[in-house]
Image: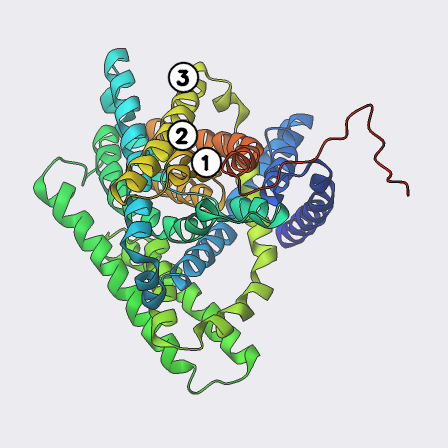
Amino acid sequence: MSSQTIILIAISVALIMGLISNRLIRFVHLPNVTAYLIVGILLGPSVLGLISPALHDTLSNLVKTLGIIVDIALGFIAFSIGSEFKLKNIKKLGKGVLTITIMQSGFALIFVDVLLTVVTLIVGNFKEYLPIILTLGAVATATAPAATLMVIKQYKAKGPVTEILLPVVAFDDAVGLILFSISFSLAQVFAKQNAGINGGSISIINILLLPLLEIVLSLVIGFIIGFILSQAMKWFKSRANRLMCMLASVFLGVALCNLFDNLFGLELSSLLVCMMIGAAFCNLREDSIMIIDGIDRWTPAIFMLFFILSGAEIDFTVIANPIVLGICGLYLVARSLGKYFGAFLGASVTKSSTNIRKYLGFTLLPQAGVAIGMARSASTTFRSYTSLGGNNEYLINIASIITAVVLTATLVYELIGPVITKIALTKAGEIEPEKKVKKNENPVQTS
């Protein structure tokens, strides 16, 4: 059987299993992303690959081969986030929402970084784990708007907490991507140094100037592509042609990042580039929302494959490691505290109501797509350094730990996040408590 046939069969099986899981997960009232991750785990080399060593190797190679799907999916996730970054809407939100958003994202990063730093300093392996600490701190900023919106719609939540929650989760991922780009740039420098790769020396150029250049260049390239995309819409009017223009722009953004890496050694952020494409486009076109809606008809399948492939990459031998379990536990605790206290202080600074201060932080715990995207992007980058020589085992190890911690944390957050969100909004009085019928009460009224 040819490799192309195997790839097509694998994609077909993944999509079919994803669709089935989509229906089954509704019986337990969990988000679709949880179902897709579980399907990926079951179909991946860590579970299905246990049947035989040959099958394990085949599945591992398939996951690597289909990595281009992950890159493209990340591009569209970032593009969607950027399309929400409309300046008119941001001005309407007011300083209060922006302050709360930035503080809860920033505190999540700081809490994770500080707690992991303290623990690794005590244990004595701080330098070895510094790239992991910086990466996980940045990933901690992201929140999953889908799970939060699901709870709000399902229970028809209304009130001050809900009103401020919606814009916060919409703007949160954009802030998170910017913080991730800065923090991960530093993580790459320390990872190279620890692995003995050229370019990993500690200097002002490597720690400050080069990461800044890569971030600025990513934003500039994204803006240029977004500008060209907005102008192209003047020439192409049909829905099909406009869809193809948007697809081409995201593909081009991802491709240029790889090109700059190969030609100049500059590691541009495809997440930042594609986010800027979406941001530039939505601000340069008044009808951008109507046009972007068309891309939603194309992306569900690729997003499903993205989550399934992410689940397939989980290595249970890594998760079973007590050190990884410890890191995951610390990450869950630190991120949750950072989100809560960041939102609490942000609400206090902006003089928001008592309910917002007390309950908003609890509604920001769910984490899914963007966090997984950040982790996959970091894992792919660290693994790519193995071709440069140096300590390849170290690079693969930190890539595996980051992926395992984030995916495990995502499963936990997707299981408990919506439940905690519901409880918080109920306590805030924005969801009506379920009515219980007393045993001695007849629920049927009689005349």
Indicate how the structure is coloured in the image. Answer: rainbow
Decide which of 141, 216 is in the foreground and name it.
Answer: 141
Name the residue located 38 percent from the left edge and 31 percent from the top edge. 335
Q: What percent of the width, then of the height, locates residue 246?
A: 46, 71
Q: Residues within 10 Å of mark 2 (few under 14, many from 20)?
A: many
Task: Tell me the element at label 3.
Answer: helix
Residue ID for mark 1: 365
Q: Amino acid at mark 3?
A: Ile
Residue ID for mark 2: 336
Q: Residue farthest to the right?
A: 447
Question: For residue 432, what is the image quadrant?
Answer: top right
Mark nearer the N terminus (3 vs 1): 3
Question: For residue 125, what is the image quadrant?
Answer: top left
Marks 2,3: beta carbons within 8 A: no
Q: What percent of the width, then of the height, locates residue 176?
A: 34, 46
User: Quick check: 96 left or right of 252?
Assistant: left
Q: What percent of the width, then of the height, locates residue 122?
A: 25, 12
Can you tell which of label 3 and label 1 is closer to the viewer? 1
User: Quick check: 44 left or right of 328?
Assistant: right
Task: Tell me the element at label 2.
Answer: helix
Q: Amino acid at mark 2?
A: Ser
Decide which of 191, 183 is in the foreground and name it.
Answer: 183
Marks 2,1: beta carbons within 8 A: yes
Task: Tell me the element at label 1.
Answer: loop
Residue ID for mark 3: 323
Name the residue located 41 percent from the left edge and 61 percent from the top edge. 84
Q: Residue farthest to the top?
A: 123
Mark nearer the N terminus (2 vs 1): 2
In this rendering, the answer to whether 338 lies above or below 72 is above
Q: What percent of the width, then of the height, locates residue 308?
A: 59, 43
